[in-house]
């Protein structure tokens, strides 16, 4: 098997230094060419917004780092153009097994339902994802300017933009930008230059990550495309262990070491290899990457600072348990890109960006809460917490009620915005909806939820059909339902150009997940408003009502709608 070769990306002289044509000002500059920065660049390019991406490196990340990509993240990556490539390369899994010592106490299936394009999770090394994103970004040569080995050394905020000081191999220069996205990671130099507090909790436990290359699966199994987690593992003196399989016969092993472990000592091969040998037995293996870490659950007080916005790990960090770091960052991008594009194109006021701050703080708080709870269960602080944890694990083998209390990391799920009200870019305040009339519709289509996927008759998928703009989705379980009022309203008063119509009939899966109704869906595929077909009258749903809902999502005035 050929080992992965980290590609080295070519850098060139910036136009500001070679005398070539260069704009006086760029709409958006992104700091950081990791998964978050590259995804943001592609998403903005899909909305016809030119971007410059700056990174002080010219290679993909070393080591697997983020490996576990959730269904919602895969749907976003699919919209960006690399989802199918990730699926083809990645290891698909949906089963998790939890052990207490030698005993399996619980297993779960993350996606028992059929009818979704994307699986519950795949495992794929971060360096593959970054490579795919770079290659996809290069398909937008007139919209995405990738500048590797260009380091931002200083920035200055203005009321109408940001000035960046940049150091490169070709010399130093400045850029002017209307907006800057800080996607420069957990150690964000941008955040540090601004002396912004990164408030949260640092957990004292240290963990060892070892990626190993091994042709034969451990535990005498032909293959392990599952998540295996041990409390009190029989092969390791620590409190927990985790095993994932990745492509290229790479296995991720995560071992809890305790708070007093010496990172430099624990990373030495002659210390790591015996630990791994206890797990894999006589199977031949090679170390691919080793790291020792201590994690923090923290976030910025605000993600939006004038014309500078923090995205991904620069804004919030969590433990790796539950795969909420990289997945949460991609949801940041999904939330922000269409809003920033709307502001730049003049279809929304700058105040729309405040909903990115509100909605993604809500999402990061949810991730931090789950992450911290998992850590307390895995690493009890008090004797009482430890006794409770051990009793739950003992009961779980024979008593199903106890299994819901096991917490080895609540796995990443889409963030719902249903409870945010007026502060969010959704219409869940009943100004354009009727709670009583819509009570017949399922919770899966509530405003603020991510629109559920479903197969369509022409071998396409619903999520993929929603596109990059607002969609007015009409769902009918059969062709006999009378929708003359709605259709007449649309015919008499065409939809605003920002909205595309999509009509689906006779699709049982779509009807089950949405109900018979009309749904305004945002560009990030969150449901913004809904109306039940059973209660549609000319007074209840008209184009004016739809325009009001759109205006609410875009923070437009009523006149602007």
Image (tube, rainbow, N blue to C red):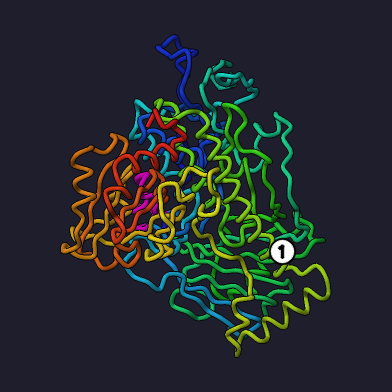
Question: Callout 1: few (<14), some (14-19), or many (20+) C-alpha neighbours within 10 Å?
Answer: few
Q: Quadrant of residue 399?
A: bottom right
- Spot the residue most to the front: 539
Image check: 461 left or right of 196?
left
- Spot the residue most to the left: 480
Image check: 132 left or right of 277?
left
- Residue drawn at point x = 57 percent, y = 33 percent: 309
Q: Quadrant of residue 286?
A: bottom right
- Residue drawn at point x = 59 percent, y = 19 percent: 159
Q: Could you tell me residue 67's position as x and y percent?
A: 51, 56
Residue 415 in the image: above or below residue 346: below
Instruction: Look at the image and say whether residue 183 sits in the magenta stretch.
Output: no
Image check: 495 left or right of 186?
left
Q: Quadrant of residue 31?
A: top right
Magenta range: 74-88
- Residue drawn at point x = 74 percent, y = 65 percent: 257
Q: Could you tell me residue 132's position as x and y percent?
A: 40, 45
| Circle 1 SS class | helix
- Magenta stretch, overall SS: helix
User: Is residue 225 visible in the rendered structure shown here?
Assistant: no
- Residue drawn at point x = 22 percent, y = 51 percent: 485
Is the N terminus in the top left, top right, bottom left or bottom right quadrant?
bottom left
User: Is residue 243 visible in the rendered structure shown here?
Assistant: yes
Question: Residue tagged by mark 1?
Answer: 271
Residue 407 in the image: above or below residue 161: below
């Amino acid at each position: 098997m050929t080992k992965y070769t980290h590609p080295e990306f070519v850098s060139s002289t910036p136009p500001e230094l070679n005398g070539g044509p260069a704009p006086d000002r760029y709409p958006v500059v992104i700091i950081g060419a990791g998964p978050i920065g590259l995804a943001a660049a592609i998403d903005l390019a899909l909305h016809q917004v030119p971007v410059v991406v700056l990174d002080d490196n010219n290679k993909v990340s070393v080591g697997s780092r983020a490996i576990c990509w959730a269904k919602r993240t895969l749907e976003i990556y699919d919209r960006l153009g690399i989802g199918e490539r990730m699926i083809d390369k990645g290891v698909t899994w949906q089963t998790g097994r939890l052990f207490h010592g030698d005993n399996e106490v619980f297993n779960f299936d993350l996606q028992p339902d059929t009818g979704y394009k994307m699986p519950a999770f795949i495992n794929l090394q971060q360096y593959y994802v970054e490579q795919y994103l770079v290659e996809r970004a290069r398909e937008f040569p007139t919209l995405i300017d990738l500048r590797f080995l260009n380091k931002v050394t200083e920035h200055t905020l203005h009321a109408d933009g940001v000035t960046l000081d940049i150091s490169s191999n070709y010399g130093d220069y400045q850029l002017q930008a209307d907006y800057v996205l800080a996607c420069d990671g957990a150690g964000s130099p941008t955040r540090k230059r601004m002396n912004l507090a990164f408030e949260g909790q640092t957990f004292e436990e240290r963990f060892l990550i070892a990626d190993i290359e091994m042709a034969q699966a451990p535990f005498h199994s032909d293959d392990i495309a599952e998540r295996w987690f041990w409390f009190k593992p029989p092969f390791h003196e620590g409190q927990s262990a985790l095993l994932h399989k990745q492509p290229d016969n790479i296995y991720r092993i995560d071992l809890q070491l305790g708070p007093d472990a010496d990172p430099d000592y624990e990373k030495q091969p002659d210390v790591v290899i015996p630990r791994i040998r206890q797990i894999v037995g006589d199977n031949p293996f090679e170390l691919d990457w080793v790291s020792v870490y201590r994690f923090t659950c923290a976030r910025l007080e605000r993600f939006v600072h004038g014309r500078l916005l923090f995205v991904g790990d620069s804004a919030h960090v969590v433990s790796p348990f539950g795969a909420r770091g990289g997945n949460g960052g991609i949801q940041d991008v999904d939330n922000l890109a269409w809003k920033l594009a709307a502001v730049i194109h003049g279809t929304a006021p700058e105040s729309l960006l405040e909903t990115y701050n509100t909605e993604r703080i809500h999402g990061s708080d949810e991730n931090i809460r789950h992450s911290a709870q998992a850590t307390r269960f895995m690493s009890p602080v008090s004797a009482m917490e430890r006794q409770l944890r051990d009793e739950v694990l003992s009961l779980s083998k024979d008593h199903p009620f106890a299994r819901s209390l096991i917490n080895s990391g609540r796995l990443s799920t889409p963030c719902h915005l249903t409870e945010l009200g007026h502060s969010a870019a959704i219409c869940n305040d009943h100004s354009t909806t009727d709670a009583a009339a819509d009570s017949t519709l399922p919770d899966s289509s509530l405003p603020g939820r991510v629109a559920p996927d479903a197969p369509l008759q022409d071998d396409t998928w619903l999520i993929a059909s929603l596109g990059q703009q607002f969609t007015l989705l009409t769902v009918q379980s059969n062709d006999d339902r009378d929708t003359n009022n709605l259709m007449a309203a649309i015919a008499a008063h065409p939809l605003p150009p920002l909205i595309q119509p999509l009509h689906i009939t006779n699709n049982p899966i779509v009807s089950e997940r949405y109900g018979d109704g009309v749904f305004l869906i945002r560009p990030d595929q969150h449901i913004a408003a809904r109306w039940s077909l059973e209660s549609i009258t000319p007074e209840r749903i008209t184009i004016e009502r739809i325009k009001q809902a759109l205006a609410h999502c875009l923070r437009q005035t009523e006149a602007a709608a």
